[in-house]
Image (spheres, rainbow, N blue to C red):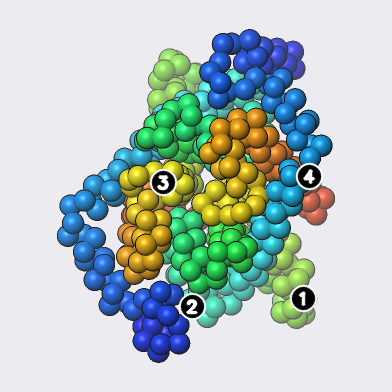
Amino acid sequence: MAAAKASLLVAVLLVWQLAPLPGYILSPAEIIKHFAQALGTAELYENIGASLARSVPGFVLGSFLGAALGLAAGVARWFDRMLSPAVFLTYPVPKIVMLPIFMIWFGIGDLSKVLIIALACFYPVFINAYYGVRQTRSILVWSALNMGATPAQIFRRVVLPSAAPMILASLRVSLALSFIVMFAAEMINARSGLGHMIRVAENSLRFDLMYVSLLAIAILGYAGDRLVRLAHSRLLAWQQPTAA
Amino acid sequence: MVWEWAARSGLWSPLLFPSLVKIFTELGLFFTRGASWMEAWVSLQRALGGFALAAVVGISLGMLMGRSKFVAGLLDPLFSGTYAVPKLALFPIFIFVFGIGSLSKVALVFLECLYPIVIMTYAGAREVNRAFLWSAQNMGASRAAILRRVVIPATAPFIFAGFRVAVPVAMIVVVITEMVASADGLGYLVIYALSSLRTDRMLAVVAVIAVLGYLLDKAVVLARDRLIYWEKLDTYYV
């Protein structure tokens, strides 16, 4: 099996490397060469920093609000009635269309981008936190009540652990979303960041820079995903890992 | 109400908060013009075209992965490894490969929709109840009959869960790509209205996109409830 996998990978790379390609598709060796060169320049790090400065606060803000409000809506019925209909109604709406509106309200700087990322990250975390709480087995809550636990204790010791797996699963989704939205926002309107870098490269036909930016965003996305999965397995050591 | 008050209070420029009346007037204008229907149709075609391709390819790949250990071993690392990578970054390259027209957008929609559909179909096809497979074999069902009568019905709820993730993604990708590089479609209209500082018109188009996204999602849920009548949809997994 491992041999089959490795040989497939090698075959694909070989075909890619040796096939006669048009100028806009670089071979793997060239991409690696350009990426190694770019690693030596400050430009790449500046753009990565600018991108992360938008996506990380947006991800943290959106996920935190989503988890907090989702938990609250799952626990308190009046809050559920007030908030959930609006959230479920707007859930299928593509959030990126709000970017132009946010740009007008909050300026074209980083604030509008952070907020649009937060908005996109909010939905999956809210919905999973909500259903995580709703799926708490009532028998556990009843037993805790029976043993004289206070509502605060029940929330911390029963509801939260039972909702945690779903919240952490949704963090994976919202992290992927945060990168997509960050990249989209930077492509549409920005003066720095990886999305901006790829636009500039495209306009000036610098294919090497395009692939450098592409590889950088791929590595960031992959590393972030690994980090969330690591946190998942650390925090929820008692739970069997489930398929994504 | 709050919106209308904010718009009329004069505290903010009408550029920030155009009054609802103006937005609805623009919305009326949008629907009475044939050209705007064309733009909406272009966007919808791109979204649905990419989605349909992804559905066909995704279900076949997912089924293959679920029923064959070998295929799963080959493709599963590929899909889970590149899952978190924003495929949107490929768009500039797609423009060069497929041209700036519809094809590059449909290709990107296809790629982004493929992931949720493959992952969900794979999860579903892997977890078909063994007892059902064995009894079908025991009763002498052919492989094709087993696939049609046992595996597909058992996987269908998962496939539709994948569809529900993929449909909003298709809309998002179409709107983004039209905002970035296009001369038609709803995303282009938004950017065009923004550049000409017609906030009221922009908000009207945003409302159209929002309603379109909502209706597409409803259509998937409706189709699901019709086709999978034996299992009620109660949890809305993301």
- Judge the density around disc 2: few (<14), some (14-19), many (≥20) Cα neighbours within 10 Å: few
Helix, strand or loop at mark 2: helix
Residue A203 as seen in the image, left or right of residue A47: left
Labels 4 & 1 near each other (Cβ < 8 A): no
Q: Which residue is mark 4?
A: A42
| Marks 2 and 3 belong to one chain | no
Badge number at residue A116: none
The quarter of the displayed image where residue A152 is located: bottom right
The quarter of the displayed image where residue A10 is located: top right
Labels 4 & 2 near each other (Cβ < 8 A): no
Q: Which residue is mark 1?
A: A153
Helix, strand or loop at mark 1: helix
Question: Which is more foreground, mark 1 or mark 2?
Answer: 2
| Label 3 – label 4 distance at C-alpha | 32 Å
- Sequence-first tag of 4 and 2: 4
| Label 2 – label 3 distance at C-alpha | 35 Å
Badge number at residue A82: 2
- State whether residue A89 is above or below residue B60: below
Q: Amino acid at mark 4?
A: Ala
Q: Which residue lies at the image location 46% right of the left edge and 66% below the top edge? A: A101
